[in-house]
Amino acid sequence: MNVLKKLFNFYLDSSIHIALSVYALTYSTLLLFHLPYDEAVLYFTFYGTIVTYNFIKYGSSAKRYFFVASRYMKWIQLLSFVCFGLALFYAYYLQWETLLWAIGLSVLSSLYILPYLPNQKNFRTLPQFKILIVALCWTGVTVVLPLVNATIFELNQTTIFFMIQRMLLILILMIPFEICDLQFDAPALETLPQRIGVAKTKLLGYIWIVLFVVIEFWQTETFLAIFYSTIGLSVLLAIVVWQASIKKSKYFTSFWVESIPIVWFLVLLFS
């Protein structure tokens, strides 16, 4: 049991689970736009997410962002290097325009921890910016990249509403993280719970959930299985927002909350 727990912790700490969530959301975009299976973009986003998230989580604590001390971190670093190679392999099969978008999103993600100003600030230290940058990156990766690679990306009403809906989904999913991290975040970050309190943050989450459903209702001409899956997803989102608290364990956010996109994808796939 101890070995299984260590493996499970490594699965979470090495960002494999969150990469599966990104994979699931990217695949969901393909399904919802009736696009064929795209192995290159799906596996590029999967492996790229592992590399990016591990760099964001552990890069700032490593010497010059690369040299780590503990054996556990070296295994995570080794996995990240392997995934980086696999991401490059699948990048070869992407459209050039997709690669340009991916490079832009990678730079934006890297600036989350890398200093870009003379006073050594990064995007994460900018007040109220943390939640927005994550939502933008996730929307770009899981919506823009698959559509661009399929050469159908254009800023029409359908795509714009879909991107807004995806951003709302990411913002809602981040609320439990924002609340659980309240005891660790520096006051200077001015996160939502720090600014308006836990209760009002949850209320804002419920409002976003309603907007998420309204957009689906507006976009759906008939009450198909997709609409009912959105209702089910909204119920799950409401539950995790309601259950979020400062004292929740890391498994609540790192596993259960991040599993919601995977569950939604499976429902879409089999419906």
Image (cartoon, rainbow, N blue to C red):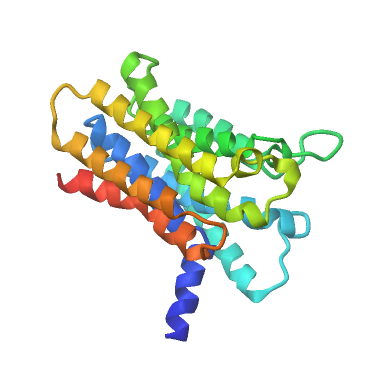
- Residue at 64 percent of width and 34 percent of height: 129
Instruction: Looking at this view, name the residue that lies furthest to the top.
Output: 156
Indicate the position of residue 257 as horizontal and vertical percent values: 42, 54
Q: Is residue 170 visible?
A: no
Image coords of residue 52 (percent x, y): 57, 48
**Residue 200 shown left or right of residue 95 in the figure:** right
Question: Left or right: 49 with respect to 269?
Answer: right
Who's the residue at 52% across and 32% down the image?
Answer: 136
Write the residue at 58% across / 35% down: 133
Number of numbered tags placed on the structure image: 0
* Image position of 90 with respect to 252: above or below: above
Q: Front-most of 68 and 115?
A: 115
- Tell me, yes or no, if residue 266 can be seen here: yes
Please tell me in which quadrant of the rendered image residue 227 appears: top left
In-image side of 50 versus 74 (left or right): left
Give the farthest residue toward the front.
Answer: 199
- Residue 198 % position (x, y): 56, 46
Question: Residue 209 is drawn in which quadrant?
Answer: top left
Which residue: 48% across, 54% down? 244
Indicate the position of residue 176 as horizontal and vertical percent values. 50, 50
Quadrant location, the C terminus: top left
Indicate whether 250 appears above or below 52.
below
Which image quadrant for residue 92? Answer: top left
**Which of the two residues, 228 or 91, is positioned nearer the viewer here?**
228
| On-image quarter of the N terminus | bottom left
- Establish if 85 lies above or below 156: below
